Image: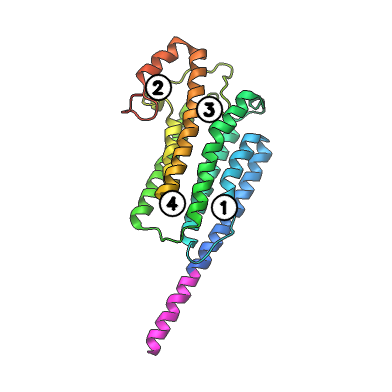
């Protein structure tokens, strides 16, 4: 009996150490992210960067951790920590002060495109944080696969697109040309396709068909809203060249022609 009791006590001790490590990592993620966020704002004082940074910062706040939800809390922490830094760095490198004009077009994109996606990311993160169900192996593999492929794909697509073409506003910079090769030769919006893969990873973390489905739908609506106005502007800017490209290249995936 004493041996069993000792074994049980050891198990609880190890379990406690693991939980303490998880809490420590969550707090470290939050602290490092805050430093990176502040550095990005100093480097490029831009409202869009602040908005992006705050979107991924909210789920990192180390409050509400329990023994039951610590596993998913840590998972959500790492996902937002990694992807939040990726997005902030992208915006620091591509955004310019003159790009932001708080006119009707900007507000239209803010409420129709950005907010539905932000609501999806933050909402699914908080649902996942509050979920006390352990992450299964199949679930973990799916989350890791979608998140890794989506993150790498998004970076790849934006690097190919270049700093002149990638921006928050639907506007055209000097010497900007139409991108029709590489990933853009396979689909018209590869960076949005990549982002939707990341969104699906967020959806799986919720362990809820309802929350994951609503979050995915909200993000998809935001991207479709953006695409509608973006493609209209591209048609006005590049005319027949863009119409030809649009008719030959699928929107989301190489095998979905619509």
Query: Which secondary structure, mark 1?
Result: helix
Q: Quadrant of residue 47?
A: top right
CA distance for labels 3 and 2: 15 Å
The quarter in which the C terminus is drawn is top left
Residue 60 disc label: 1
Query: Closer to the camera: disc 3 or disc 4?
Result: 4
Residue occupying the far top of the picture: 240
Name which of mark 3 and mark 4 comes first in the sequence.
Answer: 3
In this rendering, the label closer to the viewer, 1 or 3: 1
Alpha carbons under labels 1 and 4: distance apart: 15 Å
**153 with respect to 54 (left or right):** left
Closer to the camera: disc 1 or disc 2? 1
- Camera-nearest residue between 134 and 119: 119
| Label 4: which secondary element | helix
Labelled pair 1, 4 in contact (Cβ < 8 Å): no
Q: Which sits earlier in the primary sequence, circle 1 or circle 3?
A: 1
- List the residue tagged with mark 2: 181
Q: Quadrant of the N terminus?
A: bottom left
Where is residue 168, by image quadrant? top right
Q: Which residue position is annotated with label 4?
A: 205
Asked which secondary structure carries label 3, the reply is: loop
Label 3 to label 4, Cα distance in Å? 29 Å
Q: Do the residues labelled 3 and 4 touch (CB within 8 Å)?
A: no
Is residue 20 inside the magenta stretch? no
The residue under label 3 is: 166
Q: Residues within 10 Å of mark 4 (few under 14, many from 20)?
A: many
Magenta residues, start to end: 1-17
Residue 227 x/y as whole percent? 48, 26
Q: In which quarter of the image is residue 198?
A: top left
Choose between 190 and 104: the one closer to the eye.
Answer: 104
């Amino acid at each position: 009996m004493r041996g069993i009791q000792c074994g049980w006590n050891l198990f609880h001790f190890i379990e406690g150490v693991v939980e303490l490590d998880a809490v420590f990592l969550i707090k470290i993620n939050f602290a490092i992210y805050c430093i990176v966020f502040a550095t990005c704002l100093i480097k490029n004082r831009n409202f869009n960067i602040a908005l992006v940074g705050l979107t991924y910062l909210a789920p990192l706040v180390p409050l509400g951790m329990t023994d039951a939800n610590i596993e998913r809390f840590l998972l959500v922490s790492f996902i937002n920590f990694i992807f939040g830094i990726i997005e902030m760095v992208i915006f620091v490198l591509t955004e310019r002060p003159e790009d932001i004009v708080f006119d009707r077009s900007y507000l239209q994109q803010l409420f129709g495109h950005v907010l539905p996606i932000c609501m999806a990311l933050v909402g699914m993160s908080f649902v996942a944080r509050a979920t006390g169900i352990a992450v299964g192996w199949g679930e973990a593999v799916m989350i890791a696969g979608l998140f890794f492929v989506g993150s790498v794909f998004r970076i790849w697509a934006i690097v190919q697109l270049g700093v002149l073409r990638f921006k928050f506003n639907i506007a055209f910079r000097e010497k900007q040309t139409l991108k029709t090769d590489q990933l853009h030769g396979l689909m018209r919006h590869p960076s949005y396709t990549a982002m939707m893969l990341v969104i699906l990873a967020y959806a799986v973390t919720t362990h809820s068909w309802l929350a994951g489905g609503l979050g995915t739908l909200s993000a998809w609506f935001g991207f479709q809203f953006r695409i509608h106005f973006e493609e209209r502007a591209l048609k006005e800017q590049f005319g027949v060249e863009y119409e030809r490209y649009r008719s030959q290249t699928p929107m989301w995936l190489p095998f979905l022609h619509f």
